[in-house]
Image (spheres, rainbow, N blue to C red):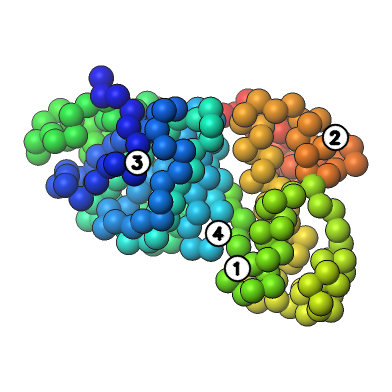
Amino acid sequence: MLEPVSEALYDSAIFPQRAVALKVGKDASRESPCHQHEKGQLVMPTVGYVTSHIQAAIWMVPPLTAVWIPGNVPHSNRISVDGEGCMLFIQPSAIAMPDDVCTVSISPMLREMILHLASMDQKYQSGSETDKLAEVLLYQLSLMPIERFDFAIPEEPKLHQIAKAMVADPADRRTIGQWAAAYAMSERTLSRLVEKHVGMTFGKWRGQLHIVVALQQLNSQVPVQRVAENLGYESVSAFITFFKKTLGQSPKQYLSRR
């Protein structure tokens, strides 16, 4: 059994194999520096959660979900204090994966296959049992549905400041008009900037942040009532209604499915 190590100390370029896996343990560095590599990377938490900073957005990775990062895309990964995870590095020619960053559902079977690969010698030979495992693993990965758990942080200066402020205090319930006034612009101007640089309304943009934070906290066993309070909702029922409207299930149903 291979011991978990730090992602920052791992160089996937030294492996010519179609897929290599790395376990990241509780004693590993909590956050990797921003970097990029030719191989595509699947970031999968096994305990707690992982937050990836990619292309001016924060991507949330709860259990039984993974974020897919195509090759040569700058990124950094941060694992929660109580978390553990697994990184799967894939040769570009080994599998047809999306060209853009996305989150992918991970079935329990695929999760165990990735963990099993990570426990084996990564310098396996073509045609070996490990190579056959990698082949089936990659095929199963190609069948997994795409999800989306991210919060965009635009490069536009004022939106960047607003995004950082919302991340620092997700419970801030100021209206779009109040946010606009705080940054010396009209409500119409702020709405137009968000539509242009984020591609959605201000309310949906903030809702994406709330989903990211809610999933982080729920997967860390924070009670639903406390999550609602941490996000500034007036009642638990209001938070559950928002969660169900966004993800199609109540927090309890969503977590039990995972």
Q: Residue 115's quadrant in the figure? A: top left
Disc nearer the start of the sequence (2/3):
3
The disc labelled 2 sits on which kind of residue?
Answer: Val
Mark 4 or mark 3, earlier in chain:
3
| 170 left or right, relative to 93 | right
Tag 3 secondary structure: helix
Residue shown at the point (39%, 60%) measured from the top left: 74
Task: Kindly identify the amino acid type of the residue bearing the numbered disc 3.
Answer: Glu
Q: Earlier in the sequence, mark 3 or mark 1?
A: 3
Q: Secondary structure at mark 4?
A: strand
Is residue 65 in view from this perspective? Answer: no
- Left or right of 230: which side holds 99? left
Which residue carries the number 1 mark?
154
Which quadrant of the view contains residue 108?
Answer: top left
Q: Nearer the viewer, mark 4 or mark 3?
A: 3
Which of these two is toward me, 135 or 238?
A: 238
Residue furthest right in the image: 234
Q: Which mark is residue 57?
A: 4
Left or right of 15 in this view: 256 = right
The correct choice, above or below, for 52 with respect to 183 in the image is: above
Q: CA distance from mark 3 to mark 1?
A: 27 Å
- Residue furthest top in the image: 1
Q: Residues within 10 Å of mark 3 (few under 14, many from 20)?
A: many
- Of the image marks 2 and 4, the number of the one nearer the N terminus: 4
Which residue corresponds to mark 2?
A: 236
Q: How far apart are the alpha carbons under marks 1 and 2? A: 31 Å
The amino acid marked with disc number 4 is Ala
Q: Position of residue 236 (x, y in %)?
A: 85, 34
User: Is residue 201 left or right of 54 when viewed as pictured?
Assistant: right
The residue to which callout 3 is attached is: 7
Number of the front mark, 2 or 3? 3
